[in-house]
Amino acid sequence: MTLPQATQTLSVMSDTADLPEAAQTALARAEELMLRVVDSDVHVLRDASRHILAAGGKRIRPKLVVLSCLAVGGEPNDDILRVAAAVELVHTASVVHDDINDHGVLRRGRPSVNAIWGRTFALLTGDFLFTKVYELMAPLREMNVPFAEATMALVEGETLQAAAVKDNNFTREVYYQIIARKTAALFRAAAYMGAVMSNDDLRYADALSNYGFNIGLAFQIVDDVLDIVGEPEKLGKTSGIDLAQGRGFAAAYNAEPVVVDNGDPMEAIKRKMMNTDTLNDARIKARVLVDSAIDSLDVLPNSEAKSALIDLAYSVIDREF
Amino acid sequence: MTLPQATQTLSVMSDTADLPEAAQTALARAEELMLRVVDSDVHVLRDASRHILAAGGKRIRPKLVVLSCLAVGGEPNDDILRVAAAVELVHTASVVHDDINDHGVLRRGRPSVNAIWGRTFALLTGDFLFTKVYELMAPLREMNVPFAEATMALVEGETLQAAAVKDNNFTREVYYQIIARKTAALFRAAAYMGAVMSNDDLRYADALSNYGFNIGLAFQIVDDVLDIVGEPEKLGKTSGIDLAQGRGFAAAYNAEPVVVDNGDPMEAIKRKMMNTDTLNDARIKARVLVDSAIDSLDVLPNSEAKSALIDLAYSVIDREF
């Protein structure tokens, strides 16, 4: 398949080589913490958790925590590492449960937890990861309220999405409500917590909240477009799931009926998406959000970490189309 | 069906009329808090949560929190009410997910969440309830660590159970590991938190921890026997699920093969269970645990709340057989 304006890169800074050294060290330690915290004498929980964690993923949420900490002049201490691990684990929990509901068999380039261990253990592994998030966060006091709110938004966003599919009510307005909650709220919380735990100046926390929220929206828009045009081998997850269920950008941006022409309906929809202005529309929207995110950082002093946050914002939209 | 030594009562103090007035008031307020905290503009989450909460249930975990608070001389303040609501919500979350895995269609005398809303929304409702627990507990600081541990034990216990069924490894030892985690850990945490939040004397917190843990074990043993001999109309949930899946007391206590005799295999198993010493064995075990629980309370001064805790312990084993 020929992709319009295809670029070479898919991952969002999937390695940390370009980050400040302090961020690289912190992220490596957060990674160890994640693998350690999911240890359990209930082996299926440990094995399934490590399977999905070891598969990689972009780790964009932990990066937001660590870079926000550094950008406001903080040191990534043990509390920051806990938050960095927790934001990735709550995302991973939602991914494991999402794959149950979507019957997704491929995730991060590997078989999904439900594909290997079955639905019952996948459900319990997701619950286990949610619980581990709670365990990690428990000692952190003030951070539990914003973290709980972001977690709730995540679940509500996933539910709004399922309800919109069921009720066939997928307008652009509903689409933005969904992505604000299911993705942008946790991005915002990650950046906010990294900042507020490291510096008392609330202008910094506000700036990084805005930054996180806007790149969260951009990230999800790009993700949904990739779901339409991407190949599963490159995406590392079962492609076209969102589209097949009539949700995401496809449904929101696609008001006209698709002519299937006796072919594969998904191919027909993809063809239609690529023949319309949808992808450009999405590119423009995502770019506006990223520009706005970067503008929020003006209040911060220049630093390696601030530059890395700017690069991270661009990488969100540069990974395709 | 004629039950051996049947008694008239099924519920464990399902109303609060016999409790101290302060406990009645606190439990009514905890009930309001639960219904209020699951409010959401995502209506399916609100409706499904209220459906399962309004169906009732024994509310034994909130009772443990409130009575433990009163028994150590405390007042059920707003923090106690949060914990009382949270312990019931985490139990409810696990019940909603359990009914997905078990295909349970009846719960607390009403259709289960997955029977009405389907699997996807049931999964998300369980996640939502877990999240609401986190939200309720977030401001409580010190209590988050014991609560997180109990929640983790709950998920691990459910997983051990599913793994024991899958591996056909249902010994009595495994059975006790399962019920200690999936039930007794949360009972213990509920009683512990009610005490430790209300009185600095750690002897009281220890006593109530032991009390909670032992009646938790007794409660689950009785529950598993009821699952064998109970009628769904009386139990209010789909009966025989545990048995049909080869788990619980049935499997652990039932080493000999069952002769099905061309009849309903479940009826044959029930008949066998009632023809052996299993029920008496269970009754004795549960009684020993309850006696031990009540002994733990010796350290507490006499009070209406202490008497209510003793009554509660007896009610756990008197609800059948």
Image (cartoon, coloured by chain):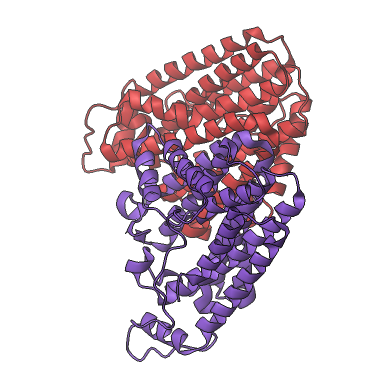
Chain colours: A purple, B red
Is residue B2 in view? Answer: no
Q: Where is residue A189 in the image (x, y as percent from the top left)?
A: 63, 52
Q: Where is residue B318 in the image (x, y as percent from the top left)?
A: 54, 23
Placement of B128 over or under A226, stated as above or below = above
Q: Position of residue B228 (x, y in %)?
A: 39, 34
How many marks on residues? 0
Q: Nearer the viewer, residue A153 or A301?
A: A301
| The quadrant where residue A297 appears | bottom right
Residue drawn 40% across the image and 45% down it: A49
Residue drawn 46% across the image and 29% down it: B181
Q: Position of residue A235 (x, y in %)?
A: 38, 66
Is residue A146 in view? Answer: yes
Taking the image as shown, residue A306 lies to the left or right of residue B178, namely right
Taking the image as shown, residue B93 lies to the left or right of residue A111, namely right
Placement of A256 over or under B303, stated as above or below = below
| The quadrant where residue A212 appears | bottom right
Q: Nearer the viewer, residue B82 or A214?
A: A214
Residue drawn 64% across the image and 19% down it: B309
Residue drawn 68% across the image and 66% down it: A295
Q: Nearer the viewer, residue A127 or A92?
A: A92
Quarter occupied by the C terminus of chain A? bottom left
Placement of A272 over or under A36, stated as above or below = below
| The quadrant where residue B16 appears | top right
Q: Nearer the viewer, residue A144 or B50?
A: A144
Placement of A289 over or under A185, stated as above or below = below
Quarter occupied by the N terminus of chain A? bottom left
